[in-house]
Image (cartoon, rainbow, N blue to C red):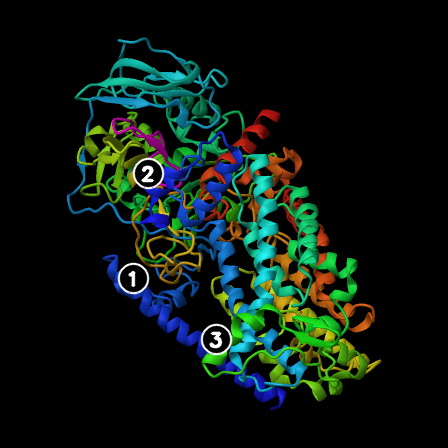
């Protein structure tokens, strides 16, 4: 039947001479069907069932709870800023619509642009389309502020995919994490869009300080009215008392007390705080971690050693206690900012992390250390994980080099001992 | 709400979530297994064989004496496949009208060896058939007596098979046997080279037929094979205990170092008496999943190979050939062969000589299948589809052969595998139960004792390396296979050697190739590296 029928696909298969068309066809076809290739390339006649698509899709599955809670939170934060529907479960339909209307464009642009470049390069090089971008495309919307302009997002993805991936030879060859590279591009090119108090709350569009829902107003109000539900109201001003400051900004100015004055620990854990879409809900991330660890898709070594790095560095800061930020209890750092998201999904990228088990311990620990140093000691950057991970991405091959070199030296020593 | 209560609630929620998900998945997997016609007992998400999981690493089984060296290997993976050979039908001797020796079974041999017998000439078992032009001292002998039939050639006139038309009653070449107690090592080596028994002795580095000029620092004999559906050497050695010991005595003369015997310490049952009571050897017991029975693993854990050193190794067949040669004065390559695979009508053991034609073993297997489909204009057409693949050797390292092909030189297993040229809808997404794997995105990983039907589906397309730590998890050696492969691809000889390529044979990395997410031909790359290094001298 239709798309689920091999014969249908075989009928529409373009000729192999048309490189781009066939490459595109092949990319889509293999999303539906595992190809019928039998083992001839290697020597084993049987092969394990795992392939790269499956690996990638399991990361995306682990991200789903982050997507759901993250989108809802966009709407929730929006109404908090307006001072209405402030209860967590008030006006669920409005919050969902706003959340989806913010996240969907990000997701669509992210995947259209990224996959477009991937398709272009695959057809140009005559390679099959590789699935590496599946994960990157799902990660990027989650590490962006909900209100980031779409052209900026597109530009950052073009920059990251071209420079960080294709220039190095495609999936599996990149040195630094592509999603973080895209974020770093916006971070340095358009800093006001991604740091400070402003960008973390979606306001749809603000004209002269009042909310304008434009087409949402027309599309959904009729429906919601007929159901007797609350509707979107144009022209409301933001609450004057609302700042949209993230816990990190508060912690810098007044330590943990300043954070808890505004946000409860529960809110930070469940995800009712402003921030990047995916990072706000620690609960969703922990469910994601559970999926990643249960399926062993991501390395527990990196996660554990990174948490260890954060804890040790946090304790050192606690002991030092130079300012109120350093006095924030080390375990509370896990509730703020993008730490958990970085730990679960960014540091564990197998391509850019260390490849050796020993290397993974060092790599994770140093990310934890550097991230904390940047977060607490550097007033210019509110959050440290993106920079710490990019830094360690660059050093990962060096760490691996020394681990592998130690193996070589062990062998030499053994030979000399005779 | 304070932080602590929030955290506690969160943790409770997550635990409940995991328990609920696991319970639901458990039920779904069991239902799926039932639908597939499998025993639901074998499937599940929750670990259902706790006892066997806990037992691993508990210490050595009771039949191993405390003084013996016991190695407990944690890494590796047993691929449990349907079609295990059974002893129900007894072990019959199978004779075929033709036998063949295949020069391509020997790694690193020149593609065109010098065949010394002309077509039509009569031969006795043990008479020289051919030799490698690069190493003319090593003679390769006819496994049976009869008439030289033909040389089957492949690409560029390379020799694929040297075929012999066999006698019904075998005649054996007469040897002038040296006295084992007095013979010098040199004379013994010269005798073995000429006898045709030498090629059974292989060496690391390079995993080739042993270089006789070199003095090995040790000789290893492995007495068990952990490859999927591999036959038990306990059967092979039955009734040949004296010959086995004699073979070990011969080997002891060939090295100044030790003779090591690798024994099955997995604990199911004690190995054959011939192995346990062997004398003049150092015994080492190995417990663990495949590749625990591989000689490469034994060497690594007992007396690792360093640069410039040589180690020789044999399997039980090789030792028996040497032993029979000295005990009875005949070149006897008879061995127990396991006929395995799900498509084999009755998987069983047979006795046969080396190079036997497999035609008679597999008469009931349906290798071809007729399919009716429609062509592009919608007319029905009948096509022949290859349904089953025949492999001489185990499914990880064996060679594909035609249904009328011949058993390989070192092989003691024949396997049928279903050709997996099917499309699978959302195959990359669905947690299907029908695959042997340790990958946790499949339910099979949670039931390591389940038994599966094998097929040759590649399960995905070849990609660049992405996953790390995968190879290491199935190679119980202190080696980084992924870095080694990269060194080979970069032609970095120094690094290859440093990373331990000389300790490896293809069979050791076969499981790496099996589990590889990126479907990399690991064994071929390793062989490329070994060949390059060997050429460098």
Q: Is residue B408 magenta?
A: yes
Image: magenta residue range: B394-414
Residue A82: horizontal and vertical position, in percent? Answer: 66, 82
Labelled pair 1, 3 in contact (Cβ < 8 Å): no
Chain where mark 1 sits: B
Chain where mark 3 sits: A
Mark 2 or 1, nearer chain start: 1
Q: Quadrant of the C terminus of chain A?
A: top right
Q: Nearer the viewer, residue A213 or B404?
A: A213
Which residue in the protein does label 2 denote? B244
Same chain, labels 1 and 3: no
Residue A223 disc label: 3
Chain where mark 2 sits: B
Labelled pair 2, 1 in contact (Cβ < 8 Å): no
Which residue appears at 49% of the width and 80% of the height? A225
Q: Nearer the viewer, residue B127 or A319?
A: A319
Most prominent secondary structure in the magenta stretch?
loop
**How many discs mark residues in the rendered view?**
3
Would residue A29 appear left or right of A245 to someone viewing this image?
A: left
Q: Is residue A194 above or below residue A46?
A: below
Label 2 – label 3 distance at C-alpha: 87 Å
Same chain, labels 2 and 1: yes
Callout 3 crowding tier (Cα within 10 Å): few <14, some 14–19, many ≥20: few
Which residue in the protein does label 1 denote? B32
Q: Nearer the viewer, residue A346 or B390?
A: A346
Single out the residue that lies furthest toward the bottom: B1
Residue A285 appears in the rendering: no
């Amino acid at each position: 039947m239709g798309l689920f029928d091999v014969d249908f696909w075989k009928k529409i298969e373009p000729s192999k001479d048309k490189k781009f068309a066939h490459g595109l066809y092949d990319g889509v076809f293999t999303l539906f069907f595992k190809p019928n290739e039998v083992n001839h390339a290697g020597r084993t006649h049987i092969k394990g069932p795992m392939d790269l698509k499956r690996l990638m899709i399991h990361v995306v599955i682990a991200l789903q709870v982050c997507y759901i809670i993250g989108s809802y939170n966009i709407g929730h934060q929006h109404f908090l800023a307006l001072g209405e529907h402030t209860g967590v479960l008030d006006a669920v339909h409005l919050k969902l619509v706003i959340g989806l209307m913010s996240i969907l464009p990000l997701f669509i642009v992210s995947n259209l642009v990224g996959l477009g470049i991937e398709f272009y390069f695959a057809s140009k090089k005559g390679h099959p389309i590789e699935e590496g971008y599946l994960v990157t495309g799902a990660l990027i919307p989650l590490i962006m502020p909900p209100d980031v302009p779409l052209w900026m997002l597109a530009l950052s993805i073009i920059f990251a995919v071209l420079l960080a991936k294709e220039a190095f030879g495609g999936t599996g060859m990149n040195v630094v994490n592509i999603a973080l590279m895209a974020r770093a591009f916006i971070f340095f090119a358009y800093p006001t869009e991604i740091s400070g108090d402003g960008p973390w709350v979606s306001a749809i569009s603000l004209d002269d300080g009042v909310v304008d829902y434009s087409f949402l107003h027309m599309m959904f109000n009729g429906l919601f009215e007929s159901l007797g539900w609350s509707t979107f109201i144009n022209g409301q001003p933001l609450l004057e008392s609302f700042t949209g400051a993230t816990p990190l900004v508060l912690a810098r100015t007044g330590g943990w007390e300043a954070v808890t004055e505004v946000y409860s620990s529960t809110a930070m854990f469940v995800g009712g705080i402003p921030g990047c879409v995916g990072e706000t809900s620690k609960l969703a991330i922990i469910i994601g971690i559970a999926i990643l660890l249960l399926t062993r898709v991501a390395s527990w070594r990196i996660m554990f050693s990174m948490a260890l790095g954060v804890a040790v560095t946090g304790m050192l800061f606690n002991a030092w206690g130079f300012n109120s930020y350093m006095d924030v209890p080390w375990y509370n750092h896990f509730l703020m900012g993008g730490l958990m998201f970085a730990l679960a999904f960014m540091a564990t990228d197998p391509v850019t992390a260390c490849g050796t088990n020993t290397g993974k311990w060092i790599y994770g620990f140093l990310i934890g250390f550097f991230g904390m140093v940047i977060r607490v000691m550097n007033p210019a950057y509110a959050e440290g994980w993106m920079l710490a991970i990019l830094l360690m991405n660059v050093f990962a091959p060096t760490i691996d080099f020394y681990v592998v070199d130690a193996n070589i030296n062990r062998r030499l020593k053994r030979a000399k001992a005779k | 709400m304070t932080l602590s209560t929030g955290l506690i609630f969160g943790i409770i929620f997550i635990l409940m979530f995991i328990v609920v998900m696991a319970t639901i998945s458990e039920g779904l997997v069991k239902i799926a297994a039932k639908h597939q016609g499998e025993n639901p007992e074998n499937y599940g998400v929750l670990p259902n064989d706790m006892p066997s999981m806990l037992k691993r690493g508990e210490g050595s089984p009771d039949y191993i004496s405390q003084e013996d060296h016991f190695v407990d290997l944690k890494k590796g993976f047993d691929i449990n496949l349907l079609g295990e050979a059974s002893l129900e039908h007894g072990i019959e001797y199978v004779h075929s009208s033709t036998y063949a020796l295949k020069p391509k079974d020997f790694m690193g041999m020149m593609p065109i060896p010098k065949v010394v017998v002309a077509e039509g000439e009569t031969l006795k078992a043990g008479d020289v058939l051919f030799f490698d032009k690069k190493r003319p001292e090593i003679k390769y002998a006819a496994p049976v007596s009869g008439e030289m039939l033909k040389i089957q050639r492949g690409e560029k006139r390379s020799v694929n098979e040297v075929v012999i038309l066999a006698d019904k009653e075998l005649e054996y070449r007469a040897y002038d046997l040296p006295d084992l107690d007095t013979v010098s090592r040199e004379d013994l080596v010269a005798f073995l080279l000429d006898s045709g028994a030498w090629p059974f002795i292989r060496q690391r580095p390079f995993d080739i037929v042993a270089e006789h000029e070199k003095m090995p620092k040790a000789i290893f004999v492995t007495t068990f094979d952990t490859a999927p559906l591999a036959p038990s050497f306990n059967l092979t050695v039955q009734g040949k205990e004296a010959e086995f010991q004699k073979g070990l005595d011969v080997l002891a003369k060939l090295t100044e170092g030790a003779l090591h015997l690798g024994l099955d310490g997995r604990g199911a049952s004690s190995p054959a008496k011939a192995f346990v009571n062997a004398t003049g050897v150092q015994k080492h017991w190995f417990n663990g999943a495949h590749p625990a029975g591989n000689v490469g693993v034994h060497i690594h854990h007992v007396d690792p190979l360093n640069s410039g050193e040589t180690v020789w190794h044999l399997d039980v067949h090789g030792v028996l050939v040497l032993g029979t040669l000295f005990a009875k004065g005949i070149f006897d390559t008879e061995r127990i062969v396991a006929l395995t695979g799900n498509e084999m009508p009755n998987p069983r053991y047979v006795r046969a000589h080396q190079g036997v034609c497999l035609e008679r073993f597999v008469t009931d297997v349906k290798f071809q299948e007729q399919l009716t489909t429609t062509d592009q204009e919608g007319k029905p057409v009948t096509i022949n589809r290859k349904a089953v693949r025949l492999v001489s050797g185990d499914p990880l390292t064996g060679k594909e052969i035609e249904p009328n092909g011949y058993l390989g030189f070192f092989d003691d297993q024949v396997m049928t595998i279903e050709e997996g040229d099917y499309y699978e809808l959302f195959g990359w997404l669905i947690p299907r139960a029908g695959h042997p794997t340790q990958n946790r995105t499949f339910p099979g990983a949670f039931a390591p004792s389940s038994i599966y039907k094998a097929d040759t589906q590649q399960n995905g397309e070849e990609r660049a390396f992405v996953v790390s730590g995968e190879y290491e998890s199935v190679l119980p050696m202190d080696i980084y296979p992924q870095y080694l492969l990269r060194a080979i691809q970069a032609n970095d000889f120094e690094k290859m050697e440093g990373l331990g390529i000389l300790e490896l044979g293809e069979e050791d990395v076969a499981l790496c190739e099996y589990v590889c997410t990126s479907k990399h031909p690991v064994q071929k790359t390793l062989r490329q590296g070994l060949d390059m290094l060997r050429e460098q001298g």
